[in-house]
Image (cartoon, grey):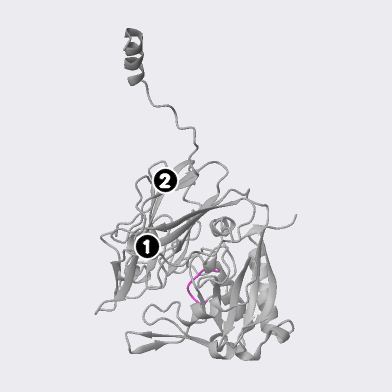
Amino acid sequence: MHRGAALLALVCAACPPPPDLTPHARVRLEDGAAAPTDDPPPALAAPDAPQGVEVFELGPLAMTDGVSPEVLIDVDEQVRSFTLLVSAQPEAHVIVDRVLSPDGALVVDPDTPTDASRQARQLSRGFVGPLLSMNRMVPKRGGGAFIVPNTPDVALVPGTWRARVRQGVVGVGADGTFEQAPLDRSVRLTVLVDTRATPSRARLEVALHFTGASGITAASAANDPLVQQVTSTLGDTFDAVGVDAMVAGLFDVESGDALRTLTLAPDLCEDGDLATLLRALEPTRGAVDVVFVDRMRCLVRGATTLDGYAGLAAAIPGDVLHEGGAHGGVAVALDIVGDDAQTAAFTVAHELGHLLGLFHTMELVSGADLPIYDVISDTPDDPSFNANLMSAAPQPSTSLSDGQAFVLAVNPWLSASAE
C-alpha cells in the first residue's frame, strides 16, 4: 500500500459513520423488539380516521412476562393526543401500564402503591398502578383504546414519549379480590396521533339502537317522550362545553328480543352479552352507539345476581374510531330507569361521558377504603360533591368542568363542527 493510501485509511478509520439520512417514523418500536412466534390475535379493523389523525400500524408484538416492547412516539407542538389501540386474545385483559414523558415524568406508573386499597385492586382488576396514575388507565378484555393525555394536568411535552402494553388473564381469588397472571401471547398494536387544531366547537354523533325495550322502536322513537328527552339532554349537556351532540340515526337491533336482557361476564360484570350486542349493531360511520335494553345482570361468586344497572359503558374510553367493536358503545336499562325520561336522559349522557374518557368524580367506596377521585383537578375532592354529570351518586346533574371538557376535546372520536 502506498504511504498516502495508508494515511488515508488511518484517517478514515477514525472518522464517524456517515449520518443516517432516513428519518425516524413518528411511531416505532424500540430497537431489538422480537417478532412473535405464536398466532397473533385478529387484525384490528382500519380506524376511520379523519384528516389530521395519523395512523401507525405496528402489527403483531411478542410479549415477555406479559409485557410488550416499548413504543416510541415523537410528539411536537402540533400533537394534542395519542391513542394506543390494542387487539388481544379474548381471554386477556390489556392495559397501557407505563408511559414516560420526555421530561422524565412517569405519567402512567406500573408499580402498585403499598397503601393501595381493596377498592383500587377491585376496580383495576389487579393492575393497580395504572389506575392510580396521573394519566389513569383501566384494563379492557380482548383489547381497547388508551389515550394520553386524559387530563389537562398531564402536559404533552414535545419530544419522544415511551409507552408499553401489559396483559394478563384475570381471575377471582377465594376472598373475592381480582388476581391476574401474565400472558405471553402476542397482541396487535395501532397508534393514532392526533395533530388537528383544537376547534372552537366539536361535533359528537350518536346512533340510537332499540331492542324493543319498553316498546320503543326506530319507527316510534322520533315521537317517544323518553327519546325526545334523551336527545334534548344530550344537546344541552354537551353544548355547555362546546360540543354539538346530534343523533346520527335511529335503528332497530336485528333479533333484539333475544338481547333485551344482557348477561355480563361473571364476577367481572363487563362484556358478555353487551359485547355481543355491540358487535351486532348497524354500523354508523363516526358515531358512538347507545342501545336501549330491559336489564343487565351479572353473577358474582356464583351466588349473587346483580341486576340494578341503569347504564353501562363498554369501556373508559371506548373503541376510538372503530366500527363494530365490543367497546364502542353504552347500554341503558329501561326496566331500571322506568318511564322517568329525565333519569334515562341523564344516564345516557353519563355513560357517554365514560365512553369518551371521563371517570366518576369519586368512585363509590365501602367500609374503610379511602376515596378514589378522578384525575382532573378542577372537580372537587369532596365526598359530598355530586353536582356533576360524572358523579357516581344518582344525582341528575349535567354540569361538566373545564378539565372534563378538555378530556372530551382531545378524544379523536370528536370532530370539528361546521363553522
Coordinates of residue 107 in the picture (x, y in percent): 40, 51
Reply above or below: 196 against 85.
Answer: above
Coordinates of residue 112 in the picture (x, y in percent): 29, 60
Q: Is residue 248 left or right of residue 296?
A: right
Q: Secondary structure at mark 1?
A: loop
Identify which residue is drawn at 63% across, 76% down.
282
Closer to the camera, 285 or 340?
285
Give the amino acid type for the residue marked by disc 1 in the picture. Ser
Residue at the far top: name it: 3
Reply above or below: 4 against 191.
Answer: above
**In this view of the protein, can residue 376 be seen by the observer?**
no
Residue identifier under label 2: 101
Coordinates of residue 393 in the picture (x, y in percent): 48, 75
Q: Secondary structure at mark 2?
A: loop
Residue identifier under label 1: 186
Give the amino acid type for the residue marked by disc 2 in the picture. Ser
- How many neighbours does mark 1 have within 10 angstroms: few (below 14), some (14-19), or many (20 or more)? many
